Image (spheres, coloured by chain):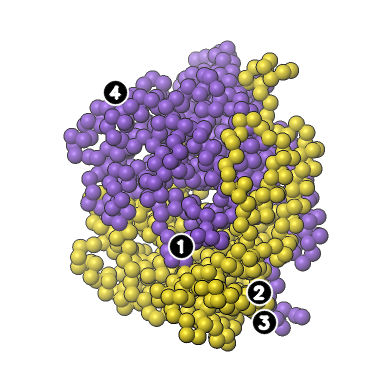
Chain colours: A yellow, B purple
């Protein structure tokens, strides 16, 4: 029957006409993916995408044969990934991904579950992941949680619950217009995601007060006390303290117990931003000590795609008072009312704990990662990354042309190439050149940050593939590239 | 070397010790996934997950052999998916997923890209998808866009830009406290995601005014005008009109051009919620006519995981004024400053267009879907689903025991089993029973909603696998189950 003869209701499905040929293509694609995973080390840590990829292909009115698309993906997309699967990629805080999670992604894509709610297996997988996390972080049984794209979204969720706690449920109807100005507190190392969350929430970035830090970039509890007092006397309404457990820039950990004491005493919401650092909790001594007190959090935001080495994207929000969490977000129209039985059963529904109503099946890749490797082994990898940052710092101290910005508290090491006698300004330029040149050569990926106003190379090690040799080898490359760049300047 | 002898920095990676054995497992898993995709029709449309899945396994301290986990996933998780891959699943608005997107998920998981920014292939794939969508929906070249988890998040992004447009960039610092109360407008069919977005934004649900609808549940432009006038005279600040292009409950389409006229005339932001309905645009006559005027939107939110049949989750926000979009969200700390070259190049960065800083590679599954099938064929599937809803309505009109709630405007058909002489209240109970029984038997998945206060069976057809026989077969099952339930009552 020709296309023109078909009634509109008889247009064929999008399923492959020939499943066997599709299966052959899929198995070949899988082999390419497996090779990509296995050979992370043999590729450069980063390669610039080809120019032709940067042009937008014409609007795809007609279809393209699968074989052509596969060739395009494997030739021009797959080889030019971000690079974070490479053992010497330490830029920003990019997790590595892992093989168990890869299988999880495979099954999840075949299932195509919508985890907004209802009664099906994916929901129970997500509940298990959350329950394990609740236990790991020592929150009580009445705590709740929800998987998110990442800590940015988890922060928005957590701070929204904090706001409802401060202003009462009427804030959902009335909003902030006309209410006493809210203020949240955090150290200067607070992540920009917190600022963005407060902006979106209508609290505004001025509603975030950055509290003085000690020399290790940790929030100073005495300064927090005086800031609170001062703001109250100005008629503002302090509602939340955000402790940073592992700052993105230099890896600082706030004193959680001391902050929790103040929050308890003053009736303030205690939120912990533990995007990667929360996982120090499972790394044993001395690293677990960095997050002592995390179990006192009213809410906690963290990622799996950083230090649990799970594929992008997946984070989590945990809230001590599950009832409060639900009353911040539950909002269901007639067509979503749940029932006692059938698909519409299975309360509670995750859509009542955050913003997304349709939710992908992120939980399976996490579930498989935690179960296949186990927390002990994952914790040893977290400890390994911390030990590697210490090793990097020790190596830097031994090399006269390298200068450490500050002792790593956990897994982030900031330093710079500073040959004897070179002016500080020149070193800023030089180190930016080093970062870029190393990326372009694919030898290693550092990102940069500023410490004390000076541009630093920065390694955030959340990479299970990194070895001790990668650390020393990359420092050799920094010195080599630095010397060459210095001559060129 | 025993585990105890290793320095912490020498803990082995999480990579498989034996890649060949991992490859064998992965290929077997792929075969199971392919069978799951291919045999959607031969499974029940839904099966209740086994009780043992509902128990949370103990905290996974030690690892579990991969073979055991695979057995568990394939035996107890994979077969108990939501059911939306089945040809007779029409509950809520759950897309079906497709084979091209499955390959996309496979490659994306191997690449593990972070699409928050930087210079790598995944970012260009996302830009292409957005550029195609900009073209499809007729927005100008200076428009911007970002992929999101779904329309819920895209709505939050779009309304945040609308707010900044109304109050100026100072809203980012000052928040809403002290500002004139904002009001947004929408019909009573507005999605709960809009309410949730306004709540999170601190505007509050009272900042959403529901405008009178006509008998087809479409926003009435004259009523919008009077509501605007009234609110202005009360000292409120109207800032945005949200038009619904395909309401979730009954599938109503607001008159976009008439609303756009009012917005233009009164300087209001014109947002279109086109979660699924936006795609009527590519379905040809008469369906494309439902969204005439969508090209005039200041912002547009829609999903790929519904009517583009892409795997969960993926939605998109498009904003007419890209500069305004960026100034609502751009906020980058030192460690994220971009550079001219290297990994940190590649401006613009997507993290400056939304809340997430870490972003998964959602774009590839969309890119492959749009390119493999092409917009023409995808559009014919959208048209097919609309024709199937009309077919369902026509069949219902022919069957004396079934009663249509209202004529479907596109792909959503609401109706109920109402045997002659049965009281309306009893029919509410009866139809809830029918929905649940059909789900439990796995014959078909309808969800329910209320129209005019009465409980209706509701089919939202965004399913490329549905055939005309599925429509009539499911109605037979409704009548059979209804008759049985009526006897049992």
- Is residue B439 depicted above or below A428 in this figure? above
Instruction: Name the residue at 66% across, 45% down.
Output: B104
Residue B337's disc number: 1
Determine the image quadrant of residue B98: top right
Chain containing the residue with disc 2: A
Q: Where does the N terminus of chain B fall, quadrant-wise?
A: bottom right
**Residue B429 image position (x, y, % from top left):** 50, 29
Q: Residues within 10 Å of mark 4 (few under 14, many from 20)?
A: some
Residue beneath disc 4 = B222
Q: Are marks 3 and 2 on the same chain?
A: no
Residue beneath disc 3 = B7
CB contact under 8 Å: marks 3 and 2:
no
Determine the image quadrant of residue B311: top right
Measure the C-alpha gap from mark 4 to mark 1: 49 Å
Q: Mark 2 falls on what kind of element?
A: helix
**Residue B315 image position (x, y, % from top left):** 52, 42
**Residue A229 image position (x, y, % from top left):** 24, 71
Q: Nearer the viewer, residue A447 or A315?
A: A447
Q: Nearer the viewer, residue A354 or B402?
A: A354
């Amino acid at each position: 029957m020709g296309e023109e003869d078909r009634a509109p209701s008889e247009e064929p499905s999008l399923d492959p006409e020939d499943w066997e040929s599709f299966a052959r293509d899929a198995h070949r694609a899988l082999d390419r993916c497996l090779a990509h995973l296995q050979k992370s080390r043999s590729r450069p840590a980063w390669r610039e995408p080809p120019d032709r990829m940067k042009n937008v292909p014409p609007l795809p009115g007609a279809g393209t044969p699968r074989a052509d698309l596969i060739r395009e993906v494997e030739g021009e997309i797959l080889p030019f990934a971000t690079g974070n699967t490479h053992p010497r990629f330490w830029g920003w805080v990019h997790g590595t991904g892992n093989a168990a999670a890869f299988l999880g992604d495979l099954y999840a894509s075949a299932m195509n579950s919508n985890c907004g709610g209802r009664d099906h297996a994916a929901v129970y997988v997500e509940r298990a992941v959350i329950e394990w996390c609740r236990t790991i972080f020592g929150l009580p049984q009445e705590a709740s949680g929800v998987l998110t794209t990442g800590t940015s979204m988890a922060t928005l969720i957590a701070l929204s619950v904090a706001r409802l706690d401060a202003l009462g449920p009427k804030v959902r109807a009335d909003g902030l217009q006309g209410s006493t100005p809210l203020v949240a507190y955090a150290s200067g190392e607070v992540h920009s995601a917190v600022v963005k969350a407060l902006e979106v929430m209508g609290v505004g970035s001025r509603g975030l007060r950055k509290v003085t830090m000690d020399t290790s970039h940790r929030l100073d509890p005495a300064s927090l006390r005086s800031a609170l007092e001062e703001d109250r006397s100005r008629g503002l309404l302090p509602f939340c303290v955000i402790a940073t457990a592992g700052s993105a820039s230099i890896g600082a950990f706030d004193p959680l117990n001391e902050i929790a004491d103040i929050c308890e005493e003053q009736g303030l919401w205690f939120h912990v931003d533990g995007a990667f650092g929360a996982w120090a909790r499972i790394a044993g001594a001395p690293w677990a000590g960095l997050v002592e007190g995390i179990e006192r959090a009213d809410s906690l935001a963290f990622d799996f795609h950083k230090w649990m080495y799970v594929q992008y994207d997946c984070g989590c929000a945990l809230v001590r008072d599950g009832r409060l969490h639900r009353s911040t977000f539950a909002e269901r129209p007639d067509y979503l009312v749940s029932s006692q039985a059938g698909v519409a059963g299975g309360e509670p529904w995750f859509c009542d704990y955050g913003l997304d109503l349709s939710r992908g099946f992120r939980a399976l890749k996490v579930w498989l990662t935690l179960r296949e490797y186990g927390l002990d082994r994952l914790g040893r990898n977290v400890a390994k990354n911390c030990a590697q940052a210490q090793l990097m710092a020790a190596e830097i101290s031994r090399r006269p042309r390298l200068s450490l910005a500050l002792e790593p508290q956990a897994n982030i090491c900031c330093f710079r190439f500073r040959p004897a006698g070179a002016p500080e300004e020149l070193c800023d330029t030089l180190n930016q050149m080093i970062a870029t040149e190393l990326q372009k050569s694919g030898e290693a990926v550092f990102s940069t940050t500023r410490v004390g106003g000076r541009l630093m190379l920065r390694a955030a090690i959340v990479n299970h593939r990194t070895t001790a040799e990668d650390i020393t080898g990359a420092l050799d490359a920094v010195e080599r590239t630095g010397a060459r760049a210095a001559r060129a300047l």
